[in-house]
Every structure is written in C-alpha cells, then in structure tokens.
Image (cartoon, rainbow, N blue to C red):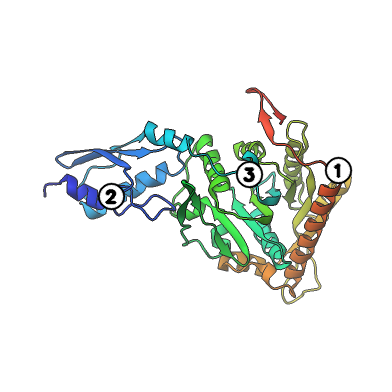
Amino acid sequence: MAYSEELVLSALQKVKYPGSDKDIVSSGMVDDIKIDGRKISFSLIVKKETDPFISSLKKACVSAILTYVGQAAQIKGNITVKTSRIETEKVKTKPLNLKNNKILPNVKNIIAVASGKGGVGKSTLAVNLAVSIAQQGFSVGLIDADIYGPSIPKMFKVENERPTVFKRDGVDLISPVSSYGVKMLSIGFFVNQEDALVWRGPMATSALKQLMTQGDWGELDFMLIDLPPGTNDIHLTLVQEVAVTGAIIVSTPQDIALADAIKGISMFTGDKVNVPILGIVENMSWFTPEELPENRYYIFGRDGAKNLAKKMNIPLLGQIPIVQSIREGGDQGKPSALDTKSIEGMAFTSLAEKVINQVEQRNKNLAPTKIVEITNMDGCSSN
C-alpha cells in the first residue's frame, strides 16, 4: 500500500495537544511531511523548546501513524521538533493578566507540602489536608508538583479527566479539575498513565510554571503545592516564582527519614530562601489494627518527628497513624478525610485546624515572604 500525505494528516488529526480540544493538524503544528516508501517523517512545531508535552506528543504521533496508516510505517525516530519564532513572539506580546505582575495573585496563602525523603506519604497527606481545609469552608487549590511521579489524580479518582483549555483576553488558560471541594491540576492529566516522564530539569520546571500561571484558579484561601521528595529544581522554581506563605514538612518517625527532613527544613529556612516552616507532620506514627482500635504498634519508631519538632523549636502539627482505610482511600479515590467521624478523619481534621491556625499566626507575626531571585550560578537572594 502506498502512503500519502493525506493519509498521514488524517492520522495526525487524531492527536490533540494535551488540555486542548484542537488536533495538532488544525493547530498548525505539523509541517514538512516527507514520504519515502515506508519511511514517514515530519516536523512538529511547538511554541518553545521547553514545552513539557513534546515527549508525550511524539509518542502519540507515532501511535497514530502505526494505527491509522499502517504497522509497517517507519516513523519512530523520524519526528523532528521545531520552534515557531512567530508564535513565540505572539506569546510575548500577550502577557498573562496578572495583578501587579504576580503569579497566583488571587491566592491568599500558598503552602508548600514537602518531604526530604520519598515514601513518607506526603501526597496522601496533601490530598487529605486539602479536603479537610475545604470541609471547613475555605476555598482550596492543589497543584501536583511531583512532575515525575504524579499521583494526586488517582487519589481523587479523576485520572481520566482532561482539563479544558480556553482563551481569556487572548491568553490560553486551563480549567482545574474539581473534586470534594478542591480545585486541582497535575501533569498526570496531560500524559498517559503508563508513560514514564523522562524530562530534563528545564522541562519539569516549565510544566510547574504552566500549572501555576495558566490555571484558572480564581480566588482561593489556600493553595497547596505537593512537591516532589528531596530538594531540587522544582523547589527552587517554586520559591523563585511565588511568595510561599509557609512550608509543611512530612516525615515518618524513623531516623533515616528525619535526617532528610532536616535537610528540607534547612533548604526552606536558609538565608537565600527564607520560607517559614509552619510545622512538621509525623506520618505513619503508629499502626492501629481495625479490630483493635485502642492498640498502637510503633513500627517506624516512636515520636521521632515529635522530638525533632521540639529540638528545632518547630510546631508539631499532627501525628497520623497507619490505618488501612487511609491506603484504601488513596487507591479508591475517596480521601479518608471525608469521614470526619473515623479515627483517621479526626486526625486530618485536627491537622487542618492546626495548619489554619499556624497560617493565621504566621501572617500576623511575620512579614510576607519575598520571591527568591537568582543573582548568579552559585546562589540566590530574596527579591
């Protein structure tokens, strides 16, 4: 069978830019199609080299060609990516409608949820905290900034949702997905669930910026940012782009997790970043069997984060037990915080109350956080 340009274009019309209802052909993203026997090549036109969806778009294009043109088509490795200078210039002439040139101008409090170590339940805690704060009558947003391992869509059972993109004043905006009173955006909405994101730092940080600047967040009392483990480009990008009200550090009681938690605290409180620590949350504090609700088994050690909080003069915001229903709630997309009468539900309600109180005290007693400005390759300063 002879391949034709029309057949290739028809196949590529099945591919849509993530978050958009327009296909890449009608969007003018396909150019320079060449067909040499079974070999098919073309250029994918994007607005900027750091577009976070380049990898997933190329994979979608390959899949569309093999599915709708033919399995024998030689397309893998034959898609080149180009940037459109004209489109880039157009974007530059249409700045985002930001109040006083600020990102998230209508968000009262921006809270970073961080951990020095992976596997401590940070995302589970961020989800349940967001739901608990919303249950108390506040407007809440949640950004899944764990670009390489987004899990929040699944925890809300909205992993199959695709946020819509619309224009306002000539600017593309993304409508957040809402669930249980929480508005959220995650890179997980824009990529296949099975795909591993193999991105360099600039692509990951560009994705975070896009979620913050292009999300149609409206007015929010609280915006929670679920950060990836450790201290890396994502953390630095966050404090460069927005004035973070405060950070919550999540850790388990064991020494190895606490050692990394200290590094996270040090990063936020250092002179170059200077973000207040609202407190520490000790997760997986003890195991309580469902059939023996009064029993406590300290699997990961006892009061490790509690003692660290006392030592560093940082508030202990809560101790969350290991309860089977917390894990089940995350897997089923029904956060445990929804059941306010359960042991775990009451723990998350108490946590939310303490976080709200700490934010109020922080805003009353401390000056607003300043955005961090990079001054050279070796360091940064507050702006």
Amino acid type, callout 2 = Leu
Residue mark closest to the camera, 3 vs 1:
3
Closer to the chain start, of discs 1 and 2, is 2
Closer to the chain start, of discs 3 and 1, is 3
- Under tag 1, what secondary structure? loop
Disc 3 to disc 2, C-alpha distance: 39 Å
Residue 217 position by quadrant: bottom right
Amino acid type, callout 3 = Lys
Near mark 2 (Cα within 10 A), the count class, few <14, some 14-19 or many ≥20, is many
Please give the label number shown on residue 12: 2
Task: Say above or below: 103 vs 375.
Answer: below
Residue 291 screen position, x and y as percent: 73, 77
At 18% from the left edge and 48% from the top edge, which residue is drawn?
6
At 50% from the left edge and 53% from the top edge, which residue is drawn?
174
At 76% from the left edge and 71% from the top edge, which residue is drawn?
343
Disc 1 to disc 2, C-alpha distance: 57 Å
Amino acid type, callout 1 = Met
- The residue carrying mark 1 is 312
Residue 184 position by quadrant: bottom right
Residue 287 screen position, x and y as percent: 74, 65
Residue 367 screen position, x and y as percent: 81, 41
Disc 3 to disc 1, C-alpha distance: 37 Å
- Under tag 2, what secondary structure? helix
- The residue carrying mark 3 is 99
Closer to the chain start, of discs 3 and 2, is 2
Nearer-the-camera pick, 145 or 87: 87
